[in-house]
Amino acid sequence: MADNPPSASENSLLSPPAPPDHQGIPRGRMALLFTVVLVSAAGNTAMQSVMPSIGTALGVADVWISLAYSWSALLWVIFAPYWASRSDRRGRKAMMGLGLAGFVASMGLCGAVLWIGLAGWLTPLLTLLLFALCRSLYGLLGSAAPPAVQAYVASRTPRAERTQALSLISSSFGLGTVIGPALAPLLIFPLVGLTGPFFSFAVIGIVAMVALRLRLPNDEPRFAARGLAFDAPYGGSGAGRHATDKPSDEEADTPAGQDTSLPAEAPALKWADKRIRPWLLAGLLGGHAQAMMLGIAGFLVLDRLGLRDDPLAGAGPVSIVLMIGAVATLLAQWGLIPILHLGPRVSTLAGMALSVVGAAIFGTAGDLHGIALGFAVAALGFGLFRPGFTSGMSLAVSRPEQGQVSGKVASVNGASYIYAPALGVWLYGHSDWIGFAAIIGFCVAVMVIGWTRLDSDEALMARADD
């Protein structure tokens, strides 16, 4: 890596990926990775758009709807690091496929259970319990895909381009959160009703699985390559391969000179590692604030607009608010970050400051316009915070540690949804002010950590790559 400091463009969090004749990932392959994350995000936000109305139709208390996600989130925290580690040994493509399979199974089964429950064939309690069980498949298996995508990108891009590439992948989540709420009202069909988005995104997930299988080259390591990886993971001598061995699919379509081997097995990256500890804490606290805001959003719309008595009509306004918030997230990741050349630390701090303002507006609004405005400002802030945290974690460690750090990022993201949405809804049910004061408190805590403990953007970029 060059000793010169990164230019402004290199220090931005988002720009188009490098073309195939450079060290970056080819555009077609990046688009496929983008799609893997986008489908999952769109499906989940479409589900969030209709779940408050489904809960109301079932006659279930709001807090129990939020708690139904907790088991899945806990499984995500437990299994994301495991799948990330396994991707280093078995290949990232296999883990992406496993993650999509978990998403498809979860969406399809959840839709079936809720449809049966809404038809009156199951009691509300049994419906919710079965929903939580089926949803757990997403935490158990779906957690394999995001860390595999992140590790795939991080291990195949140089440091100067890595932050940009990771932000592009992160923005696929933002785009998915626009598409999901926008499509949700259109997917409420006469036969399946409010469960239509579940079945529709299960089908979309199957299409994504087929595309992944056909279009992404295999990256499963060969035994000879694994044996050499410990000694010279980035060497180009070719030792250990016989002259008669055929190149793998990954090697066959990769430009000469680009390293495509899976990273060497690095020492275990501990949670208390001083390089990532402040980032982990910031990510956990900021994630709690975002999860609480999302948990409250749908129920607040129903309450402030007086739509509790008409759950089907409530799906539209909830989708509008979530979609506007998602557009604001994209504005942050596709507009503000590259234009202002924001690095991880600055992006994190600015994002939390905006989230405080947005939470205050959102918590006091009484009509759809004010609710949407407040949620959009908060989403703009979280749209700056999330890629800042992700890229800060990646840049804090070496290339061989990318698989492990991506698992920890996914685990922290999942931990935010174990109890935070239910906590937010519970506090909101007792007092609007207490619920939003807790959200603002988490954001302020991240700002304090950011000012006092996070590495500067210059220090992150100047750190040795490996």
Image (cartoon, helix red, strand yellow):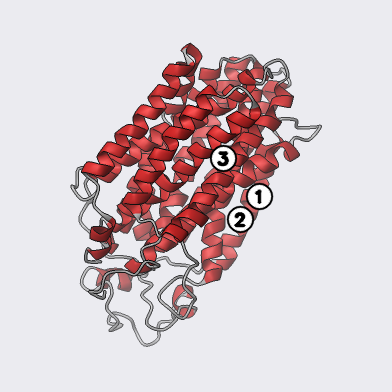
Inter-mark Cα distance, 2 to 1:
6 Å
Tell me if 411 is positioned left or right of 250 in this view: left
Q: What SS does tag 1 mark?
A: helix
How many residues crowd around disc 1 within 10 Å: few (fewer than 14), some, or many (20 or more)?
A: some
The amino acid pointed to by label 1 is Ile
Q: Earlier in the sequence, mark 1 or mark 3?
A: 1
Q: Residue furthest top?
A: 430
The amino acid pointed to by label 2 is Ala
Q: Are marks 2 and 1 in contact (CB under 8 Å)?
A: yes
Q: Work out which quarter of the rendered image holds the N terminus and state it.
A: bottom left
- Residue 233's quadrant in the figure? bottom left
- Please name whichever residue, 223 or 134, is drawn nearer the observer in this view of the structure: 134
Q: Which residue is mark 3?
A: 325
- Please name whichever residue, 429 or 111, is drawn nearer the observer in this view of the structure: 429
Residue drawn at (47%, 46%) of the image: 383
Q: Which residue is mark 1?
A: 204
How many residues crowd around disc 2 within 10 Å: few (fewer than 14), some, or many (20 or more)?
A: many
Residue drawn at (41%, 84%) of the image: 256
Q: Residue furthest bottom?
A: 243
Q: Earlier in the sequence, mark 2 or mark 3?
A: 2
- Which percent across, then down, holds residue 313? 74, 25
Inter-mark Cα distance, 1 to 3:
23 Å
- Which percent across, then down, holds residue 369? 64, 31
Q: Which residue is mark 2?
A: 208
- Does residue 113 appear in this view? no
Location of residue 274 with respect to 301 vertically, above or below: below
- Please name whichever residue, 264 or 304, is drawn nearer the observer in this view of the structure: 304
- Of badges 2 and 3, the one in the foreground is 3
Location of residue 138 with respect to 39 vertically, above or below: above
